Amino acid sequence: MPKLPAPYSFRRLLLSRLLLLTIPALILGVGLTYFMTYRKARSALLETVRQNLTQSASRYGETIDSDIRRVQQDVAIATLIPHVPPNTPATILTQVEQRLAFTPDCLQIQSINGDDILASTCGTQALGQTLFPRWAAEDPHYPPEIFTAQVFNSPPTADNPLSLQLLGPIYDASGALRYRVAVQMTLNYIPIAPLDSLAGYPVILNQEGKILMHPLRDRLDREITEEPDAERLASLLENALDGKNTYIHLFSFGGDGVELIAGYTAIAAPFSADPDERWVVLAIAPLAQTLTPLGHIRQTLLTFLLTLTLVLITATMTAIVLIAREMARPVEKLRDDVLREEKLYVTERIAQNFQIAEFNQLAGAINSMIRRLISWAEELEGAWKEAQLANQLKSEFLSTVSHNLRTPLNGIIGSLQILMDGYCDTREEELEFLDKAKQSTLYLKRIIDDILDLSQLEKGKLDVEMDRVPLMEVLEEAIAFQEPALQAKNLTLRLQPWPEPVVVHADRDKLRQVFLSILDNAIKFTPKGEITVTTTLTFHQPDLPLANGSLVTQDLRSPSGQLVIITIQDPGVGVAPEQQAKLFRPFVLVHAASGAGLGLAIARNLMDLMGGAIELASAGVNQGTTVTLYLASAQRSREAIGG
């Protein structure tokens, strides 16, 4: 019987219960206060972030629109050359470059139709070939105006690029169109203020959903439908084009998978012939970074609440200790009197001077009953336990033995009765019933032998003779013995041996008995199909877990550090998971079949004696069964794997 824990004193129990009722409630109240206060602070800060980002998006939109218009004006002014000398594109290129208020990435003087590059600062690749219409005198919009568009990804050094190409006309003194100027430039935008000031960084989309500007170069020229946040971005685009300046939460638009918050607004698309065409400007910031001030708020709040909690807990505990002491005093006095009762004379009584009437009544009852109750309780408890144990052992023994002996005895009696009554017409029938009686007798003998073996195993009186045993020889002997049973059920057995000879530490006869028992079960519970036997030699890991909850123990560790694993797998009726742990107990039968239920119990004990282990696994009913045996290898070091 397990030892019961020591009982608590009444004062300690009362004190613990009062503390368990008050302290958790106090801590819970403080925790709820912290949670609600922190949540309100977070909501307020988040609302501020949303407003700032929305305003920041508007400021970015105004800045970008102003910059593009300024660039357009600079290009238009730079191309107004009063006297265009003939056949001097290089000179014109120098004049235009000197007149520009900014440094372009590329500047070219091209023929009117753009087919020829007459002068260039950036190589021979013509700008604007696929972006602008061909200029010709027959063009109804002749002379042309300046066009612009985003055409390429930003250079690696750009912080947040908006890449543009512009085209402008150059006229000679007579007013005839002589050349055109192609300008390529990049507008870089870093945040208006650091990210922790809630300004965010800018991103631009056109109204078709194409990304025109983004700090990540691989996102440029992509459609928002290609983004993981496609639905949110589509909703953002629709709201912005409808004139709504607000915010939205994104999760994958920043490239690193963090949650983002974005304010947005719409501006008129620069250089567009359609006055209704819009660009959508976003101001985006990582949500965690915008909520950085919450750290200071949380730290201050925690410090205050912790101080308050400690003060409240101290005051509460002081009050509880005082209350518990006053309430426990009568119980402790009664306890002291009862514990001294063995030293009192018969005429003495437990003092009945308590201020509580119920305690005085209890003291009087205890005086007359305590000795008799203790004595009777001890006697009754001892007698009851002895009777229960004896009755349980008797019932289990009679039930299991009678059940397993009755079946073969009934077979013997029935066969002999038929012979004695002369119901057999031929000599062959008589021999058939005599054979049945013989088989039942042998089966009865096998049950009795198994019971005796199990008894000897459990008493530790069965010896094993450990030796170096060739595994395949013993396994093939067991398979040969079961060959008639395999043929009778039209089953096949496939043996997959280790490619090299395997030697184990075991008792040859006991190991053969284990194999016979497991193969017998596999054949018995397999209606059709193939039984597979596999042997493996491996360097095992420490403490391999088994299905029955046990572990491969230190006894399996061989000098060579190898473990032999024998697996016997059948496609038979299987075993329900809740029944598998019971199969290694004596007289346990999960399926209705002949047998005493001792095979696996004996096999487990024999494997333990040989320093091995056994496990059984099944996915469930009608899903087959796998039995795995573990034995220490007796391979010498030169026979080790790879040796």
Image (cartoon, rainbow, N blue to C red):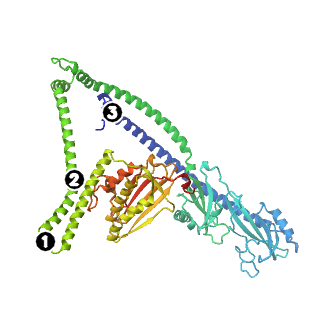
Read off the residue under disc 2. 401
259 lies left or right of 162: left
Residue sitting nearer the eye, 440 or 68: 440
Residue sitting nearer the eye, 489 or 447: 447
**Pointer 2: residues within 10 angstroms few (<14), some, or many (20+)?**
some
- Where is residue 359 shown, x and y percent of the image? 20, 25
234 lies left or right of 409: right
Read off the residue under disc 3. 18
Decide: is 10 above or below 629.
above
Residue 370 showing in the rendered view: yes
Residue sitting nearer the eye, 428 or 238: 428
Q: Which circle's residue, 3 or 2, is located before the other in the chain?
A: 3
Q: CA distance from mark 3 to mark 2?
A: 57 Å
Q: CA distance from mark 1 to mark 2?
A: 32 Å
Q: Quadrant of residue 486?
A: bottom left
Q: Hey, what amino acid is under mark 1?
A: Tyr
Read off the residue under disc 1. 423
106 lies left or right of 218: right
**Pointer 1: residues within 10 angstroms few (<14), some, or many (20+)?**
few
Q: Secondary structure at mark 1?
A: loop
The residue depicted at 84 percent of the width and 69 percent of the height is 92
Q: Residue furthest left?
A: 421
Decide: is 542 above or below 594.
above
For the N terminus, the quadrant is top left
- Where is residue 583 shown, x and y percent of the image? 32, 55
Q: Hey, what amino acid is under mark 3?
A: Leu
Decide: is 566 above or below 361.
below
